[in-house]
């Protein structure tokens, strides 16, 4: 399009994680895809890149938090292999 990024992902490891799961974990803290670019595989591409980075860094766990009312995102993450294991505070904004 016009050079505007279509998607964004933030990965945290070690003490940068919002919950401390240790040095063998990676957090996907933010994953956003602009509306005009949804359903084109960008989210899947980014998640797979996160998984690859975790493997390359010998990390055993990749986790994320998702707002409890964001059902489309929950369905997407479940389809990508994530399972609900608990709750944590989700800061919106």
Image (cartoon, grey):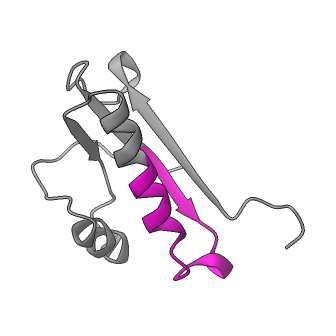
User: In the rendered image, which quarter is residue 15 located in?
Assistant: top left
Residue 48 seen by the camera: yes
Q: Position of residue 44 (x, y in %)?
A: 43, 67
Q: Position of residue 28 (x, y in %)?
A: 39, 44
Question: Which residue is most to the front?
Answer: 56
Residue displayed at 14% across by 59% down: 83
User: In the rendered image, which quarter is residue 58 located in?
Assistant: top left
Q: Position of residue 6 (x, y in %)?
A: 69, 65
Is 80 or 19 nearer to us in this picture? 80
Question: Which residue is most to the right?
Answer: 2
Q: Position of residue 76 (x, y in %)?
A: 33, 72
Residue displayed at 11% across by 48% down: 86
Residue displayed at 50% across by 75% down: 41
Q: Is residue 70 left or right of residue 79?
A: right
Q: Is residue 82 left or right of residue 71?
A: left
Figure check: 38 above or below 78:
below
Q: Is residue 21 left or right of residue 46?
A: left
Please say whether residue 4 is one of the residues in the magenta stretch.
no
Figure check: 79 above or below 28:
below
Residue displayed at 34% across by 30% down: 18
Residue 91 seen by the camera: no
Please say whether residue 31 is one of the residues in the magenta stretch.
yes
Q: Is residue 35 left or right of residue 56?
A: right
Q: Which residues are magenta?
A: 29-49
Q: Which image quadrant: the N terminus?
A: bottom right
Question: Which residue is most to the left?
Answer: 85
């Amino acid at each position: 399009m016009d050079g505007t990024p279509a998607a964004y992902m933030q990965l945290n490891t070690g003490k940068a994680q919002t919950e401390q799961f240790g040095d063998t974990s990676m957090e996907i803290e933010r994953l956003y895809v602009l509306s005009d670019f949804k359903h084109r595989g960008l989210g899947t591409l980014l998640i797979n890149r996160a998984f690859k980075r975790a493997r390359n860094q010998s990390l055993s766990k990749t986790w994320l938090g998702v707002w409890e009312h964001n059902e489309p995102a929950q369905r997407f993450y479940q389809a990508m292999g994530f399972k609900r294991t608990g709750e944590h505070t989700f800061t919106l904004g």
